Every structure is written in structure tokens, then in C-alpha cells.
């Protein structure tokens, strides 16, 4: 009997400890269920219907919305623009952030001020940044237009040109996010033990070999994190495009998210917009999985 009672006490203790934890977590689970899980499932349900805001009937169409996406040239144009923005933005952000981190890693007063200047755009709302750059790039009133006129180049409408609008969006996106990657890479640099560099210097390693064989491998986890975050952010870019160009000119800067907004909140085609959102979700998951696969690291690296 004593053995059985001791076994019962041992088996009941985890349950008694688990119950208060679940009670404390219950409010968070309820909030996540209502505001996260339910909207996700609802959007999937909408994507399988010809769901239109204000309509009396929302007929079931199955995968018809997804089939329409595959045959929609606007969707493929927006998809290509999103890929172009993501590829060039992430490459530029990581490279510029790494260069800034290497240059500003020391904790001098001057370096701290310069770091703050580069990091400041990260904490500013994208809408505000878009409005400022739209004014700066205005060919008649903006600073850039004044500079081009003083150089005899005339008024150059970067945001009004179908060829230059998308590269301009990419440039502003890189300018805005490079400071964030710089900060996390500086944190990664400070986590590298100094004795590794000392041992390599004793073996005759120069600056390039130190960077190639010590700094880069040690920064791989941090760079992977920055790449994943910037990839997701760039694929979901909306504020800059909406404020600076409104998907124009001639849909030259249209992205998946701006198309989603237009179909859902302008044309009121909620089902079609939900299909776009799930397509975007699948693309982000696939790309993130590929990044984790090809940029994975081991502790022995």
C-alpha cells in the first residue's frame, strides 16, 4: 500500500503543477484563438467561396479562386515585383548591414552616434518614411529634383517612371532596414570570443582570413535570422508602395499585398483577396524553408 500511494503521489504531482500553469496561460490562448487562429481559418474558408462584402449569398466555389489566380496576369506581375523587391532588398540590406557592423563595431562615442543615425529609420513608421521620400523625390518640389535641375539634368520623376519606380522602392527599403541588420550583426560580432582571433593571428592569419574563417562562420546564425526577417518583411511590403506610388505607374510597383488590399477593400472581392493571402503565405513558407535548408549551420562549423 505504501508503494502504491507513493506512485500515486508521483503521478499526480505533474498534473497538479500543470493545472495552475494552464489557468495562467488560458487568457493568452483565448486571445490568440480569437484574434489569430480564427481569422486564419476564416480567411481559408473565404478563399473557397465567391465571398463578396455586402452580398446576400456567398456561393461555394472550391479552388476556383486559386485557378483564377493562376490565369491572372496582374497576379503574376505582382508576384514578380514582390520577388524582385525581396531579392534585391534582402541582398542590399544584409551586405550594407554587415559593412556597417564591421565598421562601427567599436563602442566609441562617434560610432554610437553614427549607429543611432542608421538605426533611427527602423523605429519610424513606414507611412511617415514613404511620405518623406515621396516629397523628397517630387520632380517639381523635392530636394532630388532641385539637385538634378542644378546639374542640368532637368526634372527626373523617379516615382513617375515605370522603369525607375521599382528600383526606387527597393532603395528606400534598403535604407530603412539596413540599420536593424547592423545592430543585430554588431551583437553577433560581440559574441565572438577574442581568443579565436588571437590564436589565428599567432598562426599568421591576415584580416581577410580572419573574416573568412572566423567572423563569417560565427555570424551565420545571426545572418540567417536577419535574412529570414527581411525576407518576410520585403514580401509583405505595403506601406512604402501604397504611400509612394500607389502600385503605379501602370502597376509597375504592384505587389502581392497591394493587390490583396485592392481586391479585398476596393473591389470587395474578399474570397479572391483571401486566396491571394494564402498564396503569399505558401510562398513565404517555401522560401523560408529553403533558406533554413541552404543556410543551416552546425555547432562544429
Image: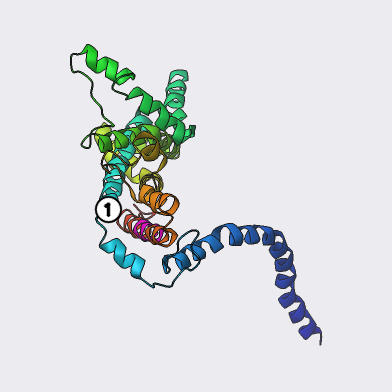
Considering depth in this image, is 190 or 100 the residue closer to the camera?
A: 100
- For the question of whether residue 203 can be seen, the reply is no
Considering depth in this image, is 49 or 225 the residue closer to the camera?
A: 49
Query: Which residue, as the protein is rendered here, is positioned at the far left?
Result: 152
Residue drawn at the location 81% of the way across and 84% of the way down: 2
- For the question of whether residue 240 can be seen, the reply is yes
Indicate yes or no whether the magenta region holds residue 245: no
Considering depth in this image, is 206 or 297 the residue closer to the camera?
A: 297
Mark 1 residue element? helix
What x and y, as percent, mark residue 265? 45, 51
Q: Quadrant of residue 297?
A: bottom left
What x and y, as percent, mark residue 54? 50, 59
Above or below — where is 82 with respect to 70?
above
> Could you tell me what secondary structure mostly forms the magenta stretch?
helix
Indicate yes or no whether the magenta region holds residue 283: yes
| Left or right: 37, with 281 as reference point | right
Position of the N terminus by quadrant: bottom right
Above or below — where is 236 with respect to 206?
below
Query: Which residue, as the protein is rendered here, is positioned at the far bottom?
Result: 1
Residue drawn at the location 70% of the way across and 67% of the way down: 18
Residue stretch in magenta: 277-284
| Left or right: 264, with 161 as reference point | right
What x and y, as percent, mark residue 274? 42, 60
Amino acid at each position: 500500500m505504501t508503494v502504491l500511494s507513493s506512485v500515486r503521489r508521483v503521478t499526480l504531482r505533474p498534473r497538479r503543477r500543470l493545472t495552475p500553469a494552464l489557468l495562467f496561460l488560458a487568457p493568452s490562448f483565448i486571445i490568440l484563438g480569437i484574434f489569430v487562429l480564427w481569422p486564419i481559418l476564416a480567411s481559408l474558408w473565404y478563399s473557397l467561396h465567391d465571398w463578396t462584402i455586402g452580398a446576400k449569398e456567398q456561393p461555394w466555389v472550391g479552388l476556383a479562386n486559386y485557378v483564377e489566380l493562376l490565369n491572372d496576369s496582374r497576379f503574376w506581375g505582382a508576384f514578380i515585383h514582390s520577388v524582385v523587391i525581396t531579392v534585391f532588398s534582402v541582398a542590399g540590406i544584409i551586405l550594407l548591414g554587415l559593412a556597417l557592423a564591421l565598421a562601427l563595431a567599436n563602442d566609441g562615442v562617434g560610432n554610437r552616434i553614427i549607429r543611432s543615425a542608421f538605426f533611427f529609420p527602423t523605429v519610424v513608421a513606414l507611412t511617415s518614411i514613404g511620405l518623406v521620400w515621396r516629397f523628397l523625390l517630387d520632380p517639381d518640389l523635392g530636394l532630388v529634383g532641385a539637385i538634378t535641375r542644378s546639374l542640368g539634368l532637368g526634372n527626373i520623376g523617379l516615382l513617375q517612371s515605370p522603369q525607375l519606380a521599382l528600383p526606387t522602392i527597393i532603395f528606400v527599403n534598403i535604407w530603412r532596414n539596413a540599420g536593424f541588420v547592423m545592430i543585430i550583426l554588431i551583437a553577433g560580432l560581440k559574441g565572438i570570443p577574442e581568443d579565436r582571433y588571437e590564436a589565428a593571428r599567432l598562426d599568421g592569419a591576415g584580416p581577410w582570413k580572419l573574416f573568412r574563417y572566423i567572423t563569417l562562420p560565427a555570424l551565420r546564425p545571426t545572418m540567417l535570422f536577419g535574412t529570414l526577417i527581411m525576407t518576410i518583411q520585403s514580401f509583405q511590403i505595403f506601406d512604402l508602395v501604397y504611400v509612394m506610388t500607389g502600385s503605379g505607374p501602370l502597376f509597375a510597383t504592384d505587389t502581392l499585398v497591394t493587390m490583396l488590399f485592392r481586391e479585398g477593400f476596393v473591389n470587395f472581392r474578399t474570397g479572391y483577396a483571401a486566396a491571394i493571402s494564402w498564396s503569399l503565405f505558401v510562398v513565404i513558407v517555401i522560401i523560408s524553408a529553403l533558406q533554413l535548408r541552404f543556410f543551416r549551420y552546425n555547432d562544429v562549423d
